[in-house]
Each structure stands twice: as C-alpha cells, then as structure tokens.
Image (spheres, rainbow, N blue to C red):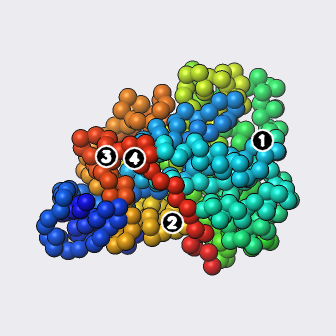
C-alpha cells in the first residue's frame, strides 16, 4: 500500500517546508520536493494544510483506579479520542498498589490495553512501594520496554514515598539509566491544610486549590531536584503548574543538571477561577496539582519558549461529573482528581501558535518530537523522515471549531474547555500508514495500536 500526501507544508522542529510525503506500508518512504511522485494507491491532497508527525501524549491515565472509582475512558475510548485529536501514541501509567510488586502490575496493564487500543501505546511504571524486591524489578521493567518510573511526594498512604525511598529509587535509576518521574507536591503539609479546611466547614471545590498552594509545589520540586543532584539520576517533573516550580527547574537546567519538566494545557488556559465556579461546577476542574491563579500562565508559556518546559502532556484522567465527581459534594477531598484532555492537546497548543506564544517548530517539538526523544521512541516516532513510522497528521490551520462535550469523543460527560473557540483542526490522521481519521470520520479500530517497547531517555548527558 502506497499513500502519497501531496501539496502540504511539512513541519519539523526546525520549521516548515513545502514537500510531499510518500508512505509505503507502515513507514515513511520519502519526503520529497513537490511533484516528484505522482502516483500511489491513495493520494491525500494537503494543499493549504500542515503535515506534521503524530502527537505523543506521554501522560495519560486510562481505566485508572482512584478514590474508589476508575477514570472513565477505557483504552479503546481514550485512544480513539486521542486519534481524533491528532495523537497517535500515548504512554499510560501502570499503577503499582502498595504491597504489590512491579511485574504483576505491568502484566495487568498489558491485559487492559492489549487488543483494545486504536493507536500505539507504551507504559510508565508508578513505583509506590520501594523495597529491595521492587528496586531489583526496575531492571526487568526496563528490559520489558518500560524505562521510566513515576513517584509521588503527595498522597500519603496511597502513593507517597519518603525522601529516603526516593533517594534509593534514584540511586537505582542512576545504575540502570532509567528516568524518575516525579509528582512534586508536599503531601504531608497539604494533608494538614486539607484537614484544617474541612474542620472549619470549608468543603467547596475551590478549597482543593487553596489547600495545595504553589509554594508547596515549588518546595517539593526543589527537594526532588536536590535528591536527583545527590544521586546523579535524571529527573522528569510531571504536570508542572506553578511559577515557583518552574523557577526551580530552570535553575537546575542552567547548571547542566538532567532535569526536565512537562506542563499541561489546563495550566496554560484554565485557572483557580474555574475551581471556584458555583453550584459544585468547580469539581469538574479538580486535578492535582490544582489550577493556579492566571498570572502563572504567562510564566508557563515563557517556559515553553525557553525549553525549561520540554513537553506538553495532558495528564488525561477523566471522571464524569455525574456520579463520579459528585462523590465529593460537601467534601472536596473526596472529589476524584483528574480532567479530560487527550483529544484537545494538539489543538490547544496550536492555539498558542495562533496567539504568538510559541512557534510552529516549538508546537511540533513539545507535542511530538521531544516526548519521542525523552521516552526512547525517536526516530521511530516524533518525526516525518524516511524509515520512521508513518504516524502523520494533516492539519488545517485555518479551520474554526468550538470545543464542547456535545462533539468530543472522550468518554466523559463534560468538557473542561466548553465553548472555547479555537483556530485549527485535525483533518486526517495516519497511524503506521493506515488512515484512521479523515473528513469522512473515524476508520480506525481497537487492536490496531501496538505496544511500544521503549529505550532509555535520549537526552541524557
């Protein structure tokens, strides 16, 4: 099967150029001057459109257990929604419960995902129980293609690790080449603030933000960076939301330390004002770290421009407003933490291009190329080049759309971006050479997506 994408503007991290893209089977065969190829089994006219590598969302939570319920997107519905939004690879988190070991956890997540994904997928491992056995298992996970391990400085009693446990895991990561990913919030202090708010009868959703102040994200980020400095381990800060945390990351990077960070669209566009919406509407916006005051947004966009924020992921973890978010009526601490977003990441970051916040090259870099390199998938993923997988998005930069729960494909009953009017829209998506989204609709299928065995981080000094 030969597919020719002709007449488009091919985007890369270095900019844009007019070129045609020839696909043979599952891979890209050539990127050539316009008109060099004129025949194929299928021809896609990309005139006036961008042609860019499929998006890689390196932070999703499909079917994740949390607070007595599960995130509402299955691997099938979540990856189908991802495809509609131009994301052709997700990296999800296998969640190790306290008292268990890593290999059975990984096996369980394979059972959930295998045969059910519409796009390709990989896994990170959540390391919540650090002991001699699990530390030894880290190498087995790496051999199985899972080379990154997420730890938590938040959620005492559930995922929380002490500084000593983090230190031990980082020492093991230094030996194996693995990457430690960190949820950096001071969970011990936060739990005290939460208990105090509830004791004072303050149970509204906005308290979720007020009891998780940005200073405690900044403190935890600094502490994680120092532990990484002592051990020599690479560190990746997940879902960074606050200027204080960004300043700590920038300082470490300026000294040459292997510290990286991602942010998410919700922190670029939403704020604590959304958490404060009346009639419990704010519960829709409960995630951790919480939404911040609007002034943080300018710093985060600046961090994207300077590469102190290397990646934009979604932390996609959708819970329906009805029956799930409502578990926390009267007690904000019981609201399931998470927001939907996997379908809209590429569009929302393109809106940053439209607004002049980032360049086209930076859009591609933050959404596709850098996550591919960060998590050991490049050049198979993240670039339009001969030999790479034919994960390709044809994007109409002039199309107008309004985001809404009525039109999105995520399996959740609300949109965090309801009514957002944006410019730009995915037109056609190829996953390993197969057209799975086109102007005619979705033509993909569960089971098309393959598990990706990942190498080590490709940025390490």
Whether residue 181 can be seen here: yes
Q: CA distance from mark 3 to mark 4?
A: 7 Å
- Residue 425 lies, with reference to residue 276, above or below; the image says below
Q: Residue at x 39, y 35 (%)?
A: 408
Q: Quadrant of residue 63?
A: top right
Q: Quadrant of residue 54?
A: bottom left
**Residue 126 x %, y %:** 69, 51
> Which numbered mark, 1 or 3, is in the foreground of this view?
3
Q: Which residue is mark 3?
A: 437
Q: Nearer the viewer, residue 200 or 180?
A: 180
Q: Which residue is mark 1?
A: 158
Q: Which residue is mark 2?
A: 377
Dot 3 crowding, Cα within 10 Å, few <14, some 14–19, many 20+ = many
Q: CA distance from mark 3 to mark 2?
A: 23 Å
Q: Going from the N terminus, do you reach mark 3 or mark 2 first?
A: 2
Q: Going from the N terminus, do you reach mark 3 or mark 4 first?
A: 4
**Residue 368 x %, y %:** 45, 61
Q: Residue at x 52, y 55 (%)?
A: 451
Determine whether label 3 and label 4 are within 8 Å by CB: yes
């Amino acid at each position: 099967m030969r597919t020719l994408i002709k007449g488009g503007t091919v985007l890369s991290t270095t900019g844009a150029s007019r070129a045609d893209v020839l696909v043979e089977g599952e891979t890209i065969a050539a990127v050539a001057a316009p008109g060099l190829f004129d025949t194929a089994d299928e021809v896609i006219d990309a005139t006036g459109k961008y042609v860019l590598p499929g998006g890689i969302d390196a932070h999703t939570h499909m079917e994740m257990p949390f607070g007595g319920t599960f995130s509402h997107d299955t691997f099938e519905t979540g990856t189908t929604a991802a495809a509609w939004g131009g994301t052709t690879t997700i990296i999800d988190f296998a969640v190790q419960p306290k008292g268990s070991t890593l290999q059975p956890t990984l096996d369980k997540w394979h059972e959930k995902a295998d045969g059910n994904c519409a796009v390709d997928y990989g896994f990170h491992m959540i390391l919540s129980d650090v002991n001699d056995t699990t530390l030894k298992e880290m190498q087995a996970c790496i051999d199985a293609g899972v080379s990154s391990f997420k730890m938590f400085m938040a959620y005492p009693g559930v995922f929380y690790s002490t500084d000593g446990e983090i230190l031990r895991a980082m020492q093991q990561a230094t030996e194996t080449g693995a990457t430690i990913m960190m949820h950096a919030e001071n969970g011990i202090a936060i739990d005290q603030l939460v208990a105090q708010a509830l004791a004072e009868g303050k149970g509204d959703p906005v308290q979720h933000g007020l009891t998780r102040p940005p200073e405690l994200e900044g403190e935890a980020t600094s502490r994680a960076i120092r532990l990484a400095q002592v051990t020599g381990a690479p560190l990746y800060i997940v879902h960074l939301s606050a200027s204080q945390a960004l300043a700590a990351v920038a300082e470490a990077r300026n000294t040459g330390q292997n510290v990286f960070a991602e942010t998410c669209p919700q922190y670029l566009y939403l704020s604590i004002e959304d958490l404060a919406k009346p009639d419990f509407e704010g519960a829709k916006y409960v995630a951790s770290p919480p939404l911040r005051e609007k002034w943080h947004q300018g710093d985060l966009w600046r961090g994207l421009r300077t590469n102190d924020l290397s990646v934009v992921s979604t932390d996609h973890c959708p819970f329906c407003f009805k029956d799930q978010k409502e578990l926390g009526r009267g007690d904000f601490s019981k609201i399931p933490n998470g927001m939907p977003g996997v379908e809209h990441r590429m569009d929302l970051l393109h809106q940053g291009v439209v607004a002049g916040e980032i360049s086209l090259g930076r859009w591609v870099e933050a959404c596709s190329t850098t996550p591919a390199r960060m998590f050991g998938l490049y050049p198979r993923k993240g670039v339009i080049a001969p030999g790479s997988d034919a994960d390709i998005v044809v994007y109409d930069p002039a199309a107008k759309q309004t985001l809404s729960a009525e039109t999105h494909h995520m399996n959740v009953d609300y949109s965090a971006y309801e009514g957002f009017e944006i410019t730009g829209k995915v037109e056609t998506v190829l996953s390993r050479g197969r057209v799975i989204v086109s102007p005619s609709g979705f033509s993909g299928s569960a089971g098309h997506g393959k598990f990706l065995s990942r190498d080590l981080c490709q940025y390490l000094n």
